[in-house]
Amino acid sequence: MTAPFLLTYAARRAAQAGLALALLAAPAAGRAGALPPGHYAGGAAHAQPAALPPLPPDRTLPLPARRPDAARLRELRGQREFRYVEAAAETGFWDNFWARIWRWLDGLRGTRTGRVAWNWVFYLALAGILGFAVLKLLQVDLARAFGRAPRRAGLPYDLLSEDIHAVDFPARLAEAEAAGNLRLAARLGYLEVLKHLSDGGRLDWQPDKTNRAYLAELPAGALREAFRECTRQFEYVWYGELPLSAALYQQVRRAQRGVAAASTATAVPA
């Protein structure tokens, strides 16, 4: 090997060795120049807080259980202010009945079929209410639309405002009985009773008076009781539309003749 090459190799090895020594010396120098704990870079000392002494071990004994006085407890239980239990309310028959009905409806609505049926009932009821309201607004006679209309006789004195003094009652009664219209015959007989009492001065007949007003005009006694029974039968037949058989019609006629007989037997009050 030539001399220049050896010199170059030796210089390179020396440079590497010096670099390695410098790297090893750097950490030691850093440790030598580091500040001690509690000091800033300017050199001023900063005191650390003193360490606290450890807590002593817990040597507390458990407290004994305190039992309340039994006599005092009995006394408090007897006071009304400490009674927090409410007495159960008593339920009657109807309360239990409706409670069962509502429980049954709740159970019914819990099923699919029950919900469908409940919806139908609700909508039908709503439609019925709306239909009834519409009919009332249109002033439709519901009795004629859904029931039988009151039967009207073909005679001119089938009105409340008829003049009983202008009617030939024996002839009209015979006509109604011959036609089989016993309800009208019972009404004609009652109007004949009113005419008889009016002609005898027992009452003051007016077309707008009620049967109860005529009854109040009669004094207490046999005549008044006979007229009361006659009025009751007439109202059942005429206003209640009671179907009259031949036997019932004869009973009504007997009550009407009884009023006439009692009127004849009773003196007219002065």
Image (spheres, grey):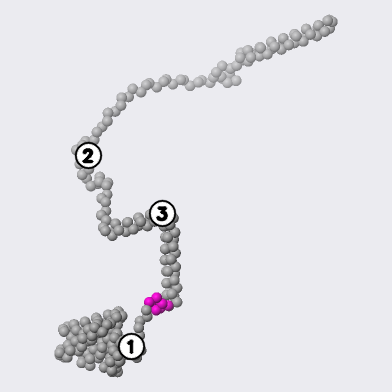
Q: Are marks 1 and 2 in contact (CB under 8 Å)?
A: no
Density class for disc 2 (Cα within 10 Å; few <14, some 14-19, many ≥20) is few
- Left or right of residue 14, residue 163 in this image: left
Q: Residue at x 26, y 58 (%)?
A: 92
Let me know if residue 155 is in the magenta part. no
Position in image of residue 237 (x %, y %): 28, 81
Q: Residue at x 26, y 93 (%)?
A: 170
How much space separates mark 2 and mark 3, taking CA atoms? Answer: 49 Å
Q: Amino acid at mark 3?
A: Gly
Question: 80 or 270, which lies in front?
Answer: 270
Q: Secondary structure beneath disc 2?
A: helix
Question: 146 or 195, which lies in front?
Answer: 146
Position in image of residue 158 (x %, y %): 33, 88
Q: Which residue is mark 3?
A: 110
Q: Secondary structure beneath disc 3?
A: loop
Q: Which residues are magenta?
A: 140-147
Q: Which residue is mark 2?
A: 73
Position in image of residue 8 (x %, y %): 80, 9
Q: On screen, 145 above or below 163?
A: above
Q: On screen, 38 above or below 194?
A: above
Q: Which residue is mark 1?
A: 158
